[in-house]
Image (cartoon, helix red, strand yellow):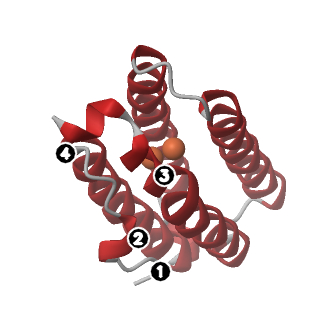
Amino acid sequence: MLIEWKDKYRTGIAEVDHEHQELVALINALHEEAKKAAEADVEGFFGDLLAAISAHFALEERAMREAAYPEYSAHKRDHEKLLDDLRDIMDLTEEAGAPQADALGAAIDAWFTTHFATFDARLHAMPIARR
Ligand SMILES: [Fe+2]
Ligand SMILES: [Fe+2]
């Protein structure tokens, strides 16, 4: 397993925590698929992952806007960086004609575990978190 869910990732916002757990499962599945090389449906997985991540970011960004959350801009920038990184890895995969399991694993793991544990963990401070 590439990413293991940890309690410290919990934001206290039920929808966000639920989606984070789904994203972790999806990323782990994509990583497993990428390791299988030839027969891997990595592009299909990338499509699913990008869609799930984009929808998830939209949810967080909407909640932050509604709460007039002061860290909104910085948080959104970090989301955009992940999407850029993911697209870069998709391009790498396409150019190489093979899944880049290591690059994918390293980037996603570092970015996600960091983003979860910092920006997302701080969502606790939002009024919406107290619902
Ligand atoms: Fe998130
Ligand atoms: Fe986030």
Q: Label 4 sits on what residue type?
A: Ala
**What secondary structure is marked by label 3?**
helix
Camera-nearest residue between 99 and 13: 13
**Which residue is identified by label 2?**
28
How crowded pointer 1 is (Cα within 10 Å; few <14, some 14-19, many 20+) is rated as some
Q: Is the residue marked 1 within 8 Å of ligand 1, measured from its CB?
A: no
Please tell me which of labels 3 and 2 falls first in the chain: 2
Q: Is the residue marked 2 within 8 Å of ligand 1, measured from its CB?
A: no
**Which residue is identified by label 1?**
2
**Which residue is identified by label 4?**
14
**What secondary structure is marked by label 1?**
loop
Q: Label 1 sits on what residue type?
A: Leu
Q: What residue do we see at 38% from left, 66% from top? A: 9
How crowded pointer 2 is (Cα within 10 Å; few <14, some 14-19, many 20+) is rated as some
Left or right: 40 as drawn, with respect to 97: left
Instruction: Confirm or deny contact between disc 1 and disc 2 (CB under 8 A).
Output: yes
Q: Which numbered disc covers residue 122?
A: 3
Please tell me which of labels 1 and 4 falls first in the chain: 1
